[in-house]
Structures are given as C-alpha cells and as structure tokens.
Amino acid sequence: MITVGVLGLQGAVREHIHSIERSGHQAVVVKKVEQLNEIDGLILPGGESTTMRRLIDKYAFLEPLRQFGEAGKPIFGTCAGLILLANKITNQEGYHLGLMDMTVTRNAFGRQKESFEATLQIEGVADDYDAVFIRAPYINAVGAGVNVLSTYQGAIVAAEEGPFLCASFHPELTKDDRLVQYFIKKIEESKKHLQVKA
Amino acid sequence: MVNVGTDRVKRGMAEMQKGGVIMDVINAEQAKIAEEAGAVAVMALERVPSDIRKAGGVARMADPTIVEEVMNAVSIPVMAKARIGHIVEARVLESMGVDYIDESEVLTPADEVYHLNKKDYTVPFVCGCRDLGEAARRIGEGASMLRTKGEPGTGNIVEAVRHMREVNAQVRKLVTMSVDEVMTFAKELGAPYEVLLDIKENGRLPVVNFAAGGIATPADAALMMQLGADGVFVGSGIFKSDNPEKFARAIVEATTHYEDYELIARVSKDLGEAMKGIEISTIQPHERMQDRGW
C-alpha cells in the first residue's frame, strides 16, 4: 500500500486526492510538518505559488520538504508546485525548494485570458494528453540530469529528475490519471530502492 | 488544438484559488500588502464596499488607471468588478487583461432584468448568490465561480452565513431527492433544470463557492470555511482595520487552518480594532445590496 500526500496549504488539493484514490492508493492532505513521515511521496498542487511560499515559511515547512526530497522520496509539482521545485526563477532572486536543476518563468503564457487547453505528447505517459494550462509557468532551460517529458510550442511543460516530476499544467483538473499513475510508479520504485538501502 | 476560455480553463482558475483569501484593494500599495500577506488574488476597486455604502449615489466600475496600477504591482491574479448587466464595463475589463470579473451587486446595477451572458467572454466571472436558484441561474449564464452575497460593507457575518447554509442545504436536498422531483424543484427555485441535474449527478456545485459579504475577523473567515466555503473574499475588513498587514496575515492563516482553534486564538491576539460593524436591521430595504440581482 502506498500513501501519497498532497501539500494542503492552499490550492487544488481535493482534486489531487481524488485522482490518487481513483488510482487505488491512499491519499493524505498534508497540513503539518510531522505528516511528512507518514507518506511515501508528495504532490505539490496547483495554486498561487507566492501564497504557498508564505505559508511554507510560516509553518517552517521549507527545510523538512527539502530533506524529504533529498532523502530520495518522490515529489510531483504541478503548476505552482513546479515553481516550488525549480532552482532558478526568471526575474526573481532566490528559489523555493531548488530540488530540480531548471529555470522556470512564472505566468509564462500570459494572464488568465491567455490560459488554454492543448493536447500533448508526454514521453512514457501518453500521446494524446488533454492538458489544462492556467496562468501557467514553463521551463526555459534544464540541467544535464533533467529529462524533458513534454514540450508545447518549443517550451518545456513537463520534466523529471530522479525522484522528482513536474508539469506546467493541471492533471488534477481532468479525469485523466495517467500522469499521476506514472508518479505512483516512481513512488513504488523509490520505495523498493529505499527499503534495499535501509 | 488550442482552446482559450473553455469551461475547464475558466473554472480551473477558481479551483487554484481554493483555501485562499481574496482581498479588496484600492491602490498598488494595498495590493502589495495583500500579496505579501499571502492573498491568492486581489480585487481592484475605487472604493471598498463600506465606503461605497457611505458615499451613496451610483457605484460604477473602477477607473481603469487603478486597475492597471494594481495589475502592474503584483504577480497574483487581479479581479475587478463590473455592474450587473453592464456589457461594456465587462468588455473593457476583459480587454485590459483582468484575470477575473466580479459581476457585482456591490456596484449599482446597470440592468434590472438581465445579467451578463458570461459564456460569451474569454475572461471568467464570479457572481454572488443567496440560494441554489440564484447559484444555478448564474452558472447557467456562464459564471465560473460563485460567492455568497452576504451583506457587503457591514462587517456583519450573519447574511453570509445564511447564504452559505441555504445553498449547501439545498444542494444536499437536491442530491438526495428522486430524479422525478427535480423539475418541480427547478420550478420552485427558478433554476435551470440541466444545471440542477448536473449538480445532482456530481453531488456538488460544478464551480467553487467562496464566502463574501461581511467577513471582519479571522474567526469569521474560519467559520465560513467550516460551513463549506472554498475560500473567502474580504472586502472592507482588512484595510478598514487598525493594522492591515497584521490583519491580512491573520485572516490568511485562519482560512488555511480553519479547524485549529489554538492557532486562530494566537493570530487573533492584539489585532487592534476590527472594522465597525452594522446591524442588518438598521439598513433600509433599498440599501440592501444583496437584493440586487435577478
């Protein structure tokens, strides 16, 4: 049995919980630092990245989240969550978790009226994935260790690096659970790996 | 295939605001305070509701200069209000790139019969509601987000509580009733039948429903979350209080942790005076903003 947490400080938490449950696994809303010990992997949901960061700081989540990632436990960031994972943000000093070697730009496609849906190819996941982009960020550049999973009009919109996965769009807003299942597979692998190490 | 302004894109934008606080601001400086405090969005206005109430006369869309100033000041989404049924105010705000429009009873209605056909726009809309009939009519017109009407600018939570309870009680009733009974329920509520069927099937409203209209303290915000609000709008409450920065942060925290009473006690300490409230029965019937909308 795998337990997947969803950081529940703000944003589209419930939709991710449903998606995990539809995939046949246990889901937990993570609001307190101690709960990180109960989960095998964590989803950083879509929402407002500035708001989430304020709350992460307020409740001293930043270091525990970094340690969670550095211990090799999988993290999947969607939209705002992708921004939290990056180690470089355009037009902004510093970064949040800095777990993935990539440069991201916030609201890169424009304001809400430019928000859109598009069909994507995602390597190893799907050739026909309906993706919902909302005031979405994209990835400008990635380091050597990062594997690009999907691009849209030349911009990188999904990538992975070791146990970390990220997407500019919102898998939780559709009923298509293939990307979440891909993440759950990552958790299963990491769990085996971490057990062997222990 | 690219699609802008789809239901998923417009409703999804509101989903991202869940668990958050949307704050009324009247200039760039206030917008920055709101963003810094952790607001998920700001509502750019010329006057907050309590000042609109005091000023009387006709309340209209804000001067575009103010909206633009706020849009340039923050990176979180910016909302703005248009008068009920005012097609041109809505189009002007859309052309400026505002992220969400509130077709709002806080402003003086431009049309006393019809609301905007919100399906026509790329920009999403939020609308107020007091019961499921009103909620379903607005959804039928294309609203992508709802909020209680409450009684804006009063600092009195009683109407927002009434509206949130009413909508949720009617949703529960709808969900448990037999399909045979839905048409008559639709007739009683003045609600579009198809919208009700969809709510019945999914067990919930198809869009998020925030609380608005009278939230003046962190405890008020937490109360509305416990009653099932997806998030809260705070209008006059923040910048009419003694210490807006502290007040704004406290409301954000209480909204996130609405069931953590020790935390709410802690953030409620030494906030200074909240905005002065108004007892609803002292408001003249024609001054009740919640009765605007059809």
Image (spheres, coloured by chain):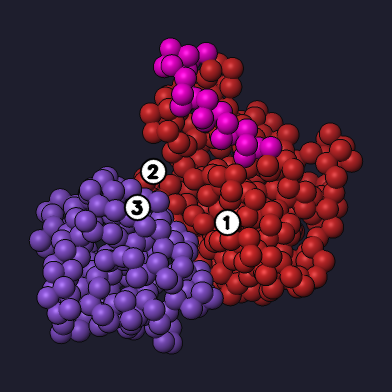
Q: Which mark is residue B7?
A: 2
- Of the numbered discs in the image, which one, if any, rests on residue B259? 1
| Magenta-tinted stretch | B162-184
Q: CA distance from mark 2 to mark 3?
A: 22 Å
Residue A36 found in image quarter: bottom left
Asked if the stretch drawn in magenta spans residue B183, the answer is: yes
- Chain letter, colour purple: A
Label 2: chain letter: B
Question: Marks 2 and 1: CB-CB under 8 Å?
Answer: no
In this rendering, position of residue B279 left or right of residue B90: right
| Alpha carbon separation for disc pair 3 and 1 | 19 Å
Please report whichever mark, 2 or 1, sits nearer to the chain's N-terminal start: 2
Residue A35 at x, y percent in the picture: 40, 67
Residue A17 got which mark? 3
Q: Chain of mark 1?
A: B
Determine the residue located farthest toward the front in the rendered image.
Answer: A198
Q: Secondary structure at mark 1?
A: loop
